[in-house]
Amino acid sequence: MSKITASFTCTACGAVHKKWAGRCDACGAWNAIVEEAPLSAGPASKSLGTARGRRIALSTLATEEAPPPRAASGLAEFDRVLGGGLVPASAILVGGDPGIGKSTLLLQAAASFARKGLKCLYISGEEASAQVRMRATRLGLADAPVGLATETNLRDILTTLDAERADLAIIDSVQTLWADMVEAAPGSVAQVRAAAHELVTFAKRRGTAVILVGHVTKDGQIAGPRVVEHMVDCVLYFEGERGHQFRILRAVKNRFGPADEIGVFEMTGAGLAEVANPSALFLSERGQASPGSAVFAGIEGTRPVLTEIQALVAPSSLGTPRRTVVGLDAGRLSTILAVLEARCGIPFAGMDVFLNVAGGMKVSEPAADLAVAAALLSSREDVALPPDMVVFGEISLSGALRPVSQTENRLKEARKLGFSQAVAPDRTKAEGDQGMKLRKMPDLVTFVGDLFAAG
């Protein structure tokens, strides 16, 4: 019989190595490789060639099945991110920074589902029952029929879920669970993978929806093996800045609905309040028109969202000017600055550049390129953009402006909030109407000339 050896797995990317190393060759992460206990010798470790399994029933792609039933919680923003409501037998992973409000959100969701008639269990491995009850009292949820328990033993949790026949089980968090069949410490790669696998399998077998809370690393990724994200049906990230009251629930993966959908909440003393119109909220503190400010008409999932992009360009006394970005990709800023200098002849050497998305919003859409360029040019030349103008469009390396999707939805949202003109790429199919003037630009050079002429 061959000797069973231990394996070494990277906690950042899940790559398997034959021996320990300080740096992962697959993703480049340092001190992320940990040892996993070998599988015990048994029937599962033997060759499957001599054993016959049952034949699997096959179907065709044309097989018609009814869409999965959904249960609405009553929290419209939470249901939107899930794709319309909670699907039975689904597994959901929720991640976010410590103290961002994950437990508060899920406790509110559990209470809402319970009041709708679903049997809900909230199992905490991080807090005592008294702490969870104090939070429920502060949120006004003490009368909600939610089953509460504090436990970290996976076997006891599965036995309880099987006996209770719950419709929804919330596990806070998966990193605290301990499976007695795995010889590793709680929170290790082996323990997290085993616990997630058992809970997902239970959800599919018993029809119970399971929501797992996951810790995140300093890079903002859910801690543990990436295979956990592949196991579950839906991966949600709860985002927000501690200095802002806004919180954004973003669907990174969703097998039952659109990905990149967002739900916006506001942190208040009574918990998380839904924000029905996030565009109006993100622009509510916008004052008079000032240099360095541009309004971007973006799309988050299926929802148009207007955000303010702020830029500050100032002479630098440092040998290497600073480039500080909040809410946007720093690499994208470097690309836009290079295009402005190479194609438009506008240098930013010797200048500090600070870029920020107001309200703590994070924008990853390439359509924000033109709004970023507009804010940078407005600050550099000290020219304020018209206060009733929105900007969107992707900038190519040649300086040309590329059209973006869902132009009509962007213009409709801008029109609803009182904006009367928009700047978009030349090949945009939509036309301005109903008081909305659409100014089409073929390239960045034309846009720069038009902006300065307006100034």
Image (tube, rainbow, N blue to C red):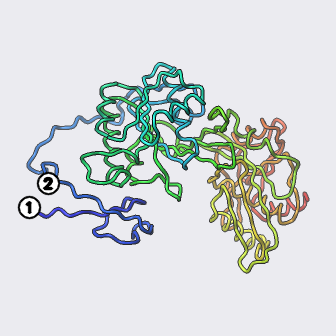
Q: Are marks 1 and 2 in contact (CB under 8 Å)?
A: yes
- Image quadrant in which the C terminus is located: bottom right
State the count of labels: 2
Q: Vertically, is 375 above or below 298?
A: below
Q: How many C-alpha atoms fall within 10 Å of the one at disc 1: few (<14), some, or many (≥20)?
A: few
Q: Residue at x 32, y 30 (%)?
A: 160
The residue under label 1 is 1
Furthest-front residue in this view: 130
Tell me which amino acid carries mark 1.
Answer: Met
Taking depth in this image into account, of 307 and 217 the one nearest to the observer is 217
- Please tell me whether mark 2 sits on a helix, a strand or a loop: loop
Say which quarter of the image contains residue 10: bottom left
Taking depth in this image into account, of 292 and 107 the one nearest to the observer is 107
The residue under label 2 is 41
- Image quadrant in which the N terminus is located: bottom left
Q: Position of residue 446 (x, y in %)?
A: 81, 62
Tell me which amino acid carries mark 2.
Answer: Ala
Return the mark for residue 22: none
Q: Position of residue 116 (x, y in %)?
A: 50, 20
Q: Residue at x 49, y 43 (%)?
A: 94
Furthest-bottom residue in this view: 319
Mark closest to the chain's N terminus, 1 or 2: 1
Q: Residue at x 84, y 37 (%)?
A: 435
Q: Vertically, is 269 above or below 236?
A: above
Horizontal placement of 78 versus 57: left or right?
A: right
Q: Residue at x 78, y 62 (%)?
A: 376
